[in-house]
Image (tube, coloured by chain):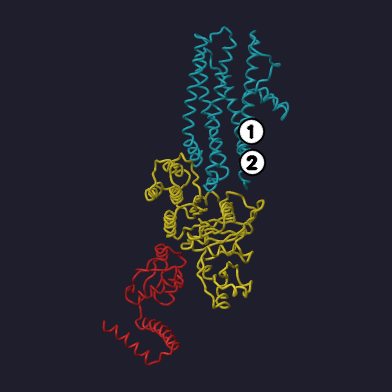
Chain colours: A cyan, B red, C yellow
Amino acid sequence: MNRKCIALIKRDLILSRKRLLLEGSVLILFMLLMVLIRLSMVFGNLKTYYDDVDTITFYLWVFGGGFFMFSLVGTLNYNILISDQAVKWDKFAFTLPYTDRQRVLYRAEENIITYLIALLMSCLNTALACAVSGRSFDIVLLGGLAGIGLLISLTGQLYHLYLLLTHNISASTALFMVTAMLFGGAYMLYVWIKMKSFYRSLGIELYGDIPADVMDPHQVAQKIFEIIIGEPARAVASCWWAVLLIFVLVFCVIFRLEIAVLGRRSE
Amino acid sequence: MDIIISNAAGEPIYEQIVSQIKAQIMSGELKEGDALPSMRALAQGLRISVITTKRAYEELEKDGFIESYTGRGSYVKKQNVEFLKEECLKEIEELLIKACDKAKAVDIDLDEMTSILEMLYGGKDND
Amino acid sequence: MTDYENAIEIRELTKKYDGFTLDKVSFDVPKGSIMGFIGQNGAGKSTTINCLLNIIKYDSGTVKLLGQELSENEAGIKERLSAVFDEIPFHDSLRASDINILMKDIYEQWDSGTFFEYLDRFVLPRRKKIGQFSKGMKMKLQIAAALSHNAQLLVMDEATTGLDPVVRNEILDIFQEYLQNEDNSILMSSHITSDLEKIADSVTFIDKGRILLTGYKDDILDSHAMIKVKKKDYALMDREDFVSARVNDYGADIMFSDRALAERKYSGAVIEKTTLEDIMLFYVNREKKEWS
């Protein structure tokens, strides 16, 4: 992480001062709200005997909050991107002593930083939810949060690549919204299905009809590896690391693509 | 050193600089060994291009009025009194040719010219 | 650091767009001088500057900055150059002190002391948000930043457009001060020719993507002549001799690119001192030949 890249990241942070403050406040409000709902469920008006409503609100708290946090913090620099074009910083930045690789690298580093911050915030939120609900903070929750974050980050990266290629802000934004909602919705659905099948195995029936059991992410990764490299895949893809690996590979490809697109610029 | 340049005058700017510096050297305002401002400083002060001041200094050097040393600047050269006088004589001749042409054009004869000259020249002595 | 003669060397720069082509643009900016890059809006000044700074890629040609081609050492060359555009590239919420913090890490030779000295000299507040600055203040801030990291080349793209005469004069003075160091050079594009009339060492005229004239300003001004003639005399003139003629009810103004020719052939006419603006006006209409 060299000094020059840090300078650009610093700029983004300085520009996001207001936004970070706002988000911090919203986060706190969200957590307060959820605690209040929880208290209301246990002691007050929302008191209920159905375990599943309790479960739903818990998972909503954890994953809804996580989704929320990653969308806000994890996509920090994309909002700046748009205002950069308006202020013509992007044009000026080409006159600064950076190589194309550094220009893309700073954004990648920034993404990693904001991802980790958002993950931390999600964990705090989850810890609170677990403490209040009397559940344990297990690795699956963490994995789920990390997964949401990666998906949102991926969406953001693709959106940025699209913006670089087309310079069409409104189209990119629309695309981003749609994909984010699709991903978010898909992920929520997935979580819901997993929960339902889990509870079914315990003999508890949750709301709604669901299709037959879906695969865990690491099983999906296994399938992908199998398709690509055949039999030895089973050994490689037997854990969550495989999912992470795929994400990392995709990010690397996007990184290279961004450098290439940047190098081709002819406006 | 005072230099006043006029944009409106027909004379190119570098020539104005040359003649003004020459005049100051001949009148003694600028003495032998005096340092002239650097081309860039002069350009900045007069708010003109450094190419113009460079040209002026080159002409002054060519005519023997100054000496330029890279790294050190330009200095007024030791002036030969005879040389100065010759420069002046050249200018006086040119002016007189013009006066004579004008005189001939309106039929003023040599005697009248001489008395005018005496009056003007003598007048200066009496001041 | 290589030793170089020209701060900028452009050869046969070509860039094609739909409907506009930068066609084999070539000119040099000698070290230690200020070059005025003159042309109408849309003539190709900004495109040329964008190409030479590598903001956009050009189709063919070579560009050398400070003696090196950008492809050899882009980051290194950009350490030693500053670009100033007509709009300040910083967000309204930033402060001058923030800019100092950023630039410190961006440029190796950034000197905070120099930057703050310029701020004081231009009377620019350090802790006020840039959004509250006037246009002139914003430009001065950009220039303060441009001059605080030992840049040897300053590229200005329409930087003085839209500023009042007082501020423009202040800025031109600063440029002349900058040029006191012989290693410094400036390329300044503008359509306000009066700014360049006095201080430019060389000028380059561009029109519709092509270079019309390039060379020392004094030479160009001295070699051109504008004469004023009566209409009947104009009718007798050889159209091949001149660049173009501005005709009205009371006579004609004619621009010649060869002053000696004009003096020789049309010695009776009134010969006017040429200005850069006149040259631009008359050359832009060179194809029409006669205009008003």
Q: Is residue B32 above or below residue C290?
A: below
Residue closest to the eye, A16 or C109: A16
Q: Is residue B93 above or below residue C185?
A: below
Q: Are marks 2 and 1 in contact (CB under 8 Å)?
A: no
Q: How many marks?
A: 2
Mark 2 falls on what kind of element? helix
Farthest front residue? C249
- Residue that label 2 marks: A166
* Chain for disc number 1: A
Q: Amino acid at mark 2?
A: Thr
Image quarter in which the C terminus of chain C is found:
bottom right
> Left or right of C47: which side holds B46?
left
Residue C45 point in image, percent of width and height: 57, 55
Residue closest to the eye, B10 or A108: B10
Residue closest to the eye, C52 or C291: C291
- Residue that label 1 marks: A175
Residue C194 point in image, percent of width and height: 48, 60
Q: Amino acid at mark 1?
A: Leu
Residue C38 lies in what quarter of the image?
A: bottom right
Q: Is residue B123 above or below residue C238?
A: below
Can you see residue C241?
Answer: yes
> Left or right of A192: which side holds C33?
left
Q: Is residue C201 above or below residue C55?
A: below
Residue A30 point in image, percent of width and height: 50, 21
* Chain for disc number 2: A
